[in-house]
Every structure is written in structure tokens, then in C-alpha cells.
Image (cartoon, rainbow, N blue to C red):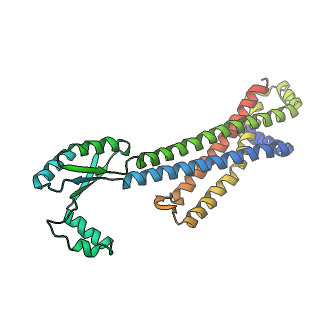
Amino acid sequence: MKSCRTIFRSLRDALKSVVRNFSLSLASVTCITITLVIIASAILISDNVKNFTREIERDVTVVAFLDSEADETVRENFELSIKKNTNIETFTFKSKEEVKEDMIKENETFSKVISSWDKDSNPLMDTYTIKVHDVDKIADTASQIKSIAGVNSVQYGEGLVEKLVGVFDAVEKITFIAAGALIVVTIFLIINTIKLTIFSRKREIGIMRLVGASNGRIKLPFVIEGIILGMIGSIVPILAVIFGYSTLYDYFGGVLFSPVIKLVKPMPSVVNTSLIILVIGMLVGMIGSARAVRKYVKV
């Protein structure tokens, strides 16, 4: 019961302090809000970058073209070889006749010319479309496939895949570095805010010491004040995440620039991001307040 009264009084004192030092509180809340907006953006960008990478990895294939004179024995040896490769997930075979039929369906302009090719005059090659487990090892895998007897050439978008994955990883890292730097700046701002609050209540703190108030009783209102500032500062970012990202998703129709680059669906992503933002806001406020109390309140 006593602990409940202590928490209630500390909460009351913290709310009074927020109102009493409105300009300082507003500065802290503004900085927290800006920081959390950037962190929310970083989280959503990270989620989408991971989704882009997964989509690329899902769609990336290695296409192996066999020699035009490749027979059934060559194909059997080829399949035995790629089955031994641990990075190969699945593969599908398409004969040159099937490739010809696909080309006829896809391109009406050349359909008449292609239709005239018979089995002997068909210049196309039998192909294997291969999916890999790890895109990072796709170059080595393609090289291994190319070394198999009977393979004419191998294609997989050499260089482009690696560059796209590298760009996405760089964007993700930069956003989190920027967010981390802002968190540090915000913590220092909260420390200064609480420090000024402590200075303005110096006499009150002295009286609390004289009447035998414990260290925890003196520190608690300031820590709660930091948590309150963090919670208030998280309101705008949470609203921006819930309504802003949903609007953005609907505006672009779930894709960005290209059908390959699909956006993460708002649910449950916005809910998870909002909870993370709220927790980060409270932690930032609590850490800033705790450091200020420890540094400036001599207890």
C-alpha cells in the first residue's frame, strides 16, 4: 500500500514538473518526436528492404543453356551434377521445342518465322532454370554449373543481383546509424532538461533529504517524468506510422517503381513498429532521466 502511494505521489510530482517546466518539456518532446519519426522510418525502411531482398532472392534464377548437340545422356549427367550442389534448391528443364513454343506465344512479330523452325533447324538450346538457396553464393554456383560438361553458357544477371542486394544493405545500415545518433542526442537533451528541473527543485530535494526520504523516493519522480516525456513524444510518430504508411501503401498500390519491389503490407507491420516506437520512447526518456538524476542529484 505504501509503495502504491509512493508511486502515485511520484507520478503526480512528475506531471506537475512537466507542466511547470513546459518550455523545457516541449523541447524534449519535440526532439523525441523527431528522433522517433526517423527511427520509425528506419524500421519501416528496414522491413521493406528485407522484403525487397527476399523478393529478389525468390525471383533470381540461374539459366543454364546446354550445347545444341546435347543428348539425353548429357542431360542426365548434368542433372546428377547439379543435384550434388548444396546451394541448388530446385531446377526445371525446358527443351528447345518448349522454348520455341513460349517465344511464339510471347512475340507475335516473330511467331511466323519461329513457327517455320523444325526440330533440326531450331537454333535454340535446351535450358535449365535453377533456383539457389543463398544468393550471396550465386556467382560461385553459376561458375560450378558452367564447368559441367555439355553446358554452353550460364546467365543469372551477373553483377546486377549483387549490386541490388548491396545497395539495400547500405540503405538499411545508414538509416539505423542516423537513428542511433539521434537517440544519443535526444538522451543528452533529456539529461539537460531533467538537470534544470532538478536545479529548480533543489530546495525541495534538500527538504526531502532532511526528513529522511530514501534515494529511490527522490529519484522516482524524475525517472517517471522522463518516461512521460517519452510517451508524449511517441504519439505523433505512432500516428504517422499507422496512418502515413497505410496511406503510402494504398497510394502506390503495394509496389514501388516496379512490381519486383513490393512494399510490406501495413498489418501487422505498423502495429509492431508502433509498439517498438512506444518502448523506445519510454526507454530513451527513462535512461536520460536516470543519468541526469545519478549525475546531478547528490544522494
Is residue 190 shown left or right of residue 81? right
State the residue at coordinates (65%, 47%): 38
Evaluate whether residue 169 shows in this view: yes
Q: Residue furthest left?
A: 73
Residue appearing at x 42%, y 51% in the figure: 54
Q: Is residue 1 visible?
A: no
Q: Residue at x 77, y 39 (%)?
A: 10
* Residue 60: % across, % down: 36, 53
Compared across the picture, whether 100 is left or right of 234 comes to left
Residue 1: horizontal and vertical position, in percent? 70, 39
| Nearer the observer, 90 or 105 | 105
In the displayed structure, does residue 90 sit left or right of residue 20?
left
**Foreground: 85 or 17?**
85
| Quadrant in the rendering for residue 14 | top right
Horizontal side of 82 relative to 107 (left or right) equals left
Instruction: Residue at 22% x, 74% y: name it.
Output: 115
Dividing the picture into quarters, in which one does residue 283 lie?
Answer: top right
